[in-house]
Amino acid sequence: MRNRRRALGALTVLLMAAPAAHAASAGPAGPAGPDRPRLPLPWTDDLTIDRTGNVSPDGSVTLYGSYRCVREGAGYARATVLVTLTQDGERHGLGGYNAVCDGQRHRWLIDAANVGPYQPGPADAEGTLLRFDAGGSFVPVPRSAVGVEREVRLVGGDG
């Protein structure tokens, strides 16, 4: 009788945890719904882009966000955040931010000058967390770990 209770209790815990784990990994288009935020798992790579960025009168753009890059074993722990911005048919890479794969959440900032005729208003941003893995070779090989797209609002600032 005692073993049946233990087995039933363990099964109940597993069944209760399964929907929460599924919702956390499903992303914005999954069962969590399009309006609910995606819940990143603490042991996976993750990348976010803030909803607002800055643009100066000369078109210089600053975007912000956060990342988490998980260290995989004793391997090479280097990564880069790359961001591309599109507004009114203009599409430009803004550059990169050197990331560290230590499992902690970090903020990133990319400040790009002379990239295009950007102005205050809505724009689309695409971000990629690019990992560099040694993979048994002398030269680290880049691989895309996480990609994210987001509509951002560029806000005017001082030039």
Image (spheres, rainbow, N blue to C red):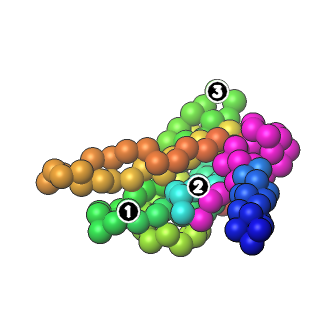
Q: Quadrant of the N terminus?
A: bottom right
Range of magenta residues: 21-42
Density class for disc 3 (Cα within 10 Å; few <14, some 14-19, many ≥20) is: few
List the residue tagged with mark 1.
Answer: 72
Looking at the image, residue 155 lies above or below residue 68: above
Label pair 2/1, CB-CB below 8 angstroms: no
Residue at image location 62% in from the left, 59% down from the top: 41
The residue shown at (48%, 51%) is 129
Q: Is 134 one of the magenta-colored residues? A: no
Q: Quadrant of the C terminus?
A: bottom right
Give the side of residue 158 with respect to residue 113, left or right: right
The crowding category of the residue bearing disc 2, from other C-alpha atoms within 10 Å (few below 14, some 14 to 19, many at least 20), is many
Q: Which mark is residue 89?
A: 3
Q: Which residue is mark 2?
A: 47
Mark 1 is surrounded, within 10 Å at the Cα level, by few (under 14), some (14 to 19) or many (20 or more) other residues, namely few
Above or below: residue 143 compared with residue 131? above
Q: Position of residue 81 (x, y in %)?
A: 48, 54
Look at the numbered discs 1 and 3 and tell me whether their residues touch, using CB distance below 8 Å. no
Q: Quadrant of residue 148?
A: top right
Q: Secondary structure at mark 1?
A: loop
Q: Secondary structure at mark 3?
A: loop
Residue placed most toward the observer, 91 or 35: 35
Labels 1 and 3: the sequence-earlier one: 1
- Between circles 2 and 1, the one closer to the viewer is 1
Q: Nearer the viewer, mark 3 or mark 2?
A: 2
Residue 145 visible: yes
